[in-house]
C-alpha cells in the first residue's frame, strides 16, 4: 500500500486534509494505495509556487525550454516500463502493449512541443501606418490550471503540460482521482530538469478541481472531461473572465457506404471501437451502414469482434482491452444495455464478464433508431451500435444529429463522396477509410458540446500564448 502525496514546488508535500481516496485496481477491485483529497489551501500553495516560478520560467528562452522538454522526454522513455506499470495498475490496460501504444506516443508528443517552442509565428513586422512600425509579440499567458481524465492518464497530462511549458507558462495539474500514479511519476521525472514550481501536481476529487478553477491565480484553465464538467468549468471561469480550453465528450459517427471495403472497415472499426474498452471520446462506437451491405457488415463485425476483441486482466496474453476504469463506469455501461429498447438486437456480448473486476464483454447492438439513448448519449464503454441508412443525405443528417462534434469517419471508395462528407460533417476531425489515428502535428478538438480549443499541433500550442501588438513611432 502506497500513500501518494502532492508534488508542489519541486517536492512531495503532505496535504492539509486527512481525507484520502482509495486507489482501486479495476482488474481486481483491490485497493493498492491512497491519494489525498487536496483542499483549497493545497491548491493555493501550488498556485503560489507556480506564480513564483513563472518569474524565471517565463523569461527563459525557447531554446532553454526546448532542452528541458527534450530531457524530460528522454527520461520518460528511459523509464517507459515503470510508467507502463503505473498506468496499467491504475487503468487495467493490457500491459504487453502499453509501452508502444501509449508511453512512447507520449514521449513523441513531448518532443513535438519541445520543437514547437522555437517556431512560434506571427505577422511580419512592418509599417502598417505611416511613420509607425508594428510587430507582434507572442507571450506566455502566465500560470495555468489543468485537469485530466482517467482514460489516458499520462497521455492527457502530456497534452496539457507540454504545450503550456513550451510556451513559457507554469502549471498546476490535477489528474483524475482514480488514476494519479503516472502523472505523479511524470512530475517527479520532470523535476530533475525544471526549476521548482514550474510543474505542480495536486490530487483530489471534484472539490479539488473546483478549487483550482475558482482560484484567482490561473489566467487559463484547461480540462479534458465530460460535458457536464466542462460546462461547470466554463461557468466558474466566466465569473473571473479566465480563458478556458475544453476537450469534452464525443459520439463519433462512423459512416460505411455500400462501396466500402467491408473487410477493411470491419477490422478498422472493431479495433477503433473496442480499444481501451471504448473509453475514448473519439471511439468508433456509433456506426451507420448503408442498407445494401448492412446485414453483411453486422454479421462480419460481430464475428470479427468475437474472435479479436477479448477482454481480461492486464497480464493476460492476447487481450485487446482490459476492464473499464471504475465501478461507476461499469454501472453506466450496463445501464445503457439494460435500457435498450425492444427493437434493439444484441448481436454480440451485452454482459459484465466475471464477478471480479470491472470487465465488460465486447458488445455489438443493431436495430437502433436515431432518437435512441444509446445513439444520442456517450456510453464510454466497449459497445458499438449500428444503424441502417438509405442514402448520403440521410447518413449526413443522422451523423450530425447529436450534441457532440469531436470526431467522425467515412468509409468509401468514392473520392467525391468522401470530400463532400468531409466538408459537411460537423466534427473537428474527419478520418477517411480509417478511424482513431492521432499525430502530434495535427490538431485534436471539437465543436458544439465537445468543447473548444485544440490539443496537439501548433494550434494547440498557440492556445497557451497571448498576443501583444507593439507599435513604435519612427517618424
Image (cartoon, rainbow, N blue to C red):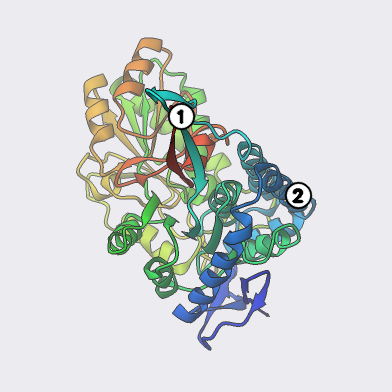
Q: Taking 387 as reference, is 217 left or right?
A: right
Vertical order, 72 against 271 (above or below): below
**Is residue 407 placed above or below 183 in the rendered structure?**
above
Where disc 1 sits, the SS reads loop
**Image coords of residue 146 (percent x, y):** 48, 59
Q: Name the quarter where the C terminus is drawn.
A: top left
- CB atoms of marks 1 and 2 within 8 Å: no
Q: Position of residue 366 (x, y in %)?
A: 32, 39
Q: Nearer the viewer, residue 226 or 128?
A: 128
Residue placed furthest toward the bottom: 18
Q: Position of residue 392 (x, y in %)?
A: 26, 20
Q: Which mark is residue 474?
A: 1
Eye-nearest disc, 1 or 2: 1
- At a point 42% along the width and 62% down the height, the residue shown is 329
Q: Which residue is mark 2?
A: 71
The quadrant of the rendering that contains the N terminus is bottom right
* Residue at x 48%, y 58% (from the top left corner): 144
Q: Residues within 10 Å of mark 2 (few under 14, many from 20)?
A: many
Q: In which quarter of the view is residue 27 placed?
A: bottom right
The foreground one among 168 and 227 is 168
Closer-to-camera residue (299/205):
205
* SS label for mark 2: helix
Amino acid at each position: 500500500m502506497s500513500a501518494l502525496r502532492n508534488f508542489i514546488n519541486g517536492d512531495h508535500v503532505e496535504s492539509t486534509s486527512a481525507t484520502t481516496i482509495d486507489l482501486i485496481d479495476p482488474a481486481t477491485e483491490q485497493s493498492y494505495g491512497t491519494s489525498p483529497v487536496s483542499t483549497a489551501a493545497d491548491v493555493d500553495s501550488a498556485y503560489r509556487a507556480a506564480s513564483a516560478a513563472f518569474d524565471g520560467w517565463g523569461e527563459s528562452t525557447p531554446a532553454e525550454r526546448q532542452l528541458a522538454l527534450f530531457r524530460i522526454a528522454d527520461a520518460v522513455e528511459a523509464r517507459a516500463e515503470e510508467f507502463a506499470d503505473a498506468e496499467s495498475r491504475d487503468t487495467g490496460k493490457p500491459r504487453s502493449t502499453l509501452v508502444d501504444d501509449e508511453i512512447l506516443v507520449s514521449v513523441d508528443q513531448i518532443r513535438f512541443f519541445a520543437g514547437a517552442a522555437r517556431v512560434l509565428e506571427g505577422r511580419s513586422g512592418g509599417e502598417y501606418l505611416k511613420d509607425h512600425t508594428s510587430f507582434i509579440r507572442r507571450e506566455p499567458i502566465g500560470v495555468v490550471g489543468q485537469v485530466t481524465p482517467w482514460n489516458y492518464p499520462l497521455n492527457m497530462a502530456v497534452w496539457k503540460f507540454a504545450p503550456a511549458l513550451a510556451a513559457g507558462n507554469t502549471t498546476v495539474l490535477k489528474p483524475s482521482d482514480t488514476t494519479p500514479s503516472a502523472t505523479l511519476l511524470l512530475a517527479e521525472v520532470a523535476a530533475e530538469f525544471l526549476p521548482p514550481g514550474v510543474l505542480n501536481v495536486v490530487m483530489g476529487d471534484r472539490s479539488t478541481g473546483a478549487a483550482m478553477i475558482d482560484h484567482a491565480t490561473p489566467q487559463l484553465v484547461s480540462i479534458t472531461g465530460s460535458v457536464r464538467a466542462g460546462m461547470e468549468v466554463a461557468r466558474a471561469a466566466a465569473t473571473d473572465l479566465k480563458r478556458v480550453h475544453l476537450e469534452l465528450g464525443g459520439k463519433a459517427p462512423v459512416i460505411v457506404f455500400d462501396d466500402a471495403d467491408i473487410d477493411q472497415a470491419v477490422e478498422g472499426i472493431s479495433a477503433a471501437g473496442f480499444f481501451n474498452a471504448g473509453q475514448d471520446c473519439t471511439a468508433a462506437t456509433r456506426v451507420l451502414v448503408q442498407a445494401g451491405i448492412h446485414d453483411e457488415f453486422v454479421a462480419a463485425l460481430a464475428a470479427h469482434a468475437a474472435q479479436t476483441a477479448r477482454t481480461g486482466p492486464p497480464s493476460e496474453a492476447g487481450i485487446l482491452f482490459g476492464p473499464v476504469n471504475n465501478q461507476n463506469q461499469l454501472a453506466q455501461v450496463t445501464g445503457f444495455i439494460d435500457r435498450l429498447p425492444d427493437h434493439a438486437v444484441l448481436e454480440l456480448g451485452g454482459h459484465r464478464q466475471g464477478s471480479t473486476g470491472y470487465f465488460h464483454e465486447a458488445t455489438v447492438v443493431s436495430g437502433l433508431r436515431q432518437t435512441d439513448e444509446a445513439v444520442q448519449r456517450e456510453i464510454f464503454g466497449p459497445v458499438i451500435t449500428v444503424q441502417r441508412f438509405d442514402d448520403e443525405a440521410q447518413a449526413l443528417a443522422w451523423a450530425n444529429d447529436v450534441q457532440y462534434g469531436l470526431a467522425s469517419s467515412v468509409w468509401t471508395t468514392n473520392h467525391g463522396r468522401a470530400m463532400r462528407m468531409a466538408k459537411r460533417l460537423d466534427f473537428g476531425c474527419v478520418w477517411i477509410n480509417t478511424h482513431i489515428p492521432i499525430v502530434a502535428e495535427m490538431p485534436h478538438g471539437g465543436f458544439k458540446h465537445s468543447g473548444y480549443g485544440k490539443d496537439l499541433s501548433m494550434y494547440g500550442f498557440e492556445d497557451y500564448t497571448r498576443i501583444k501588438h507593439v507599435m513604435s513611432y519612427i517618424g
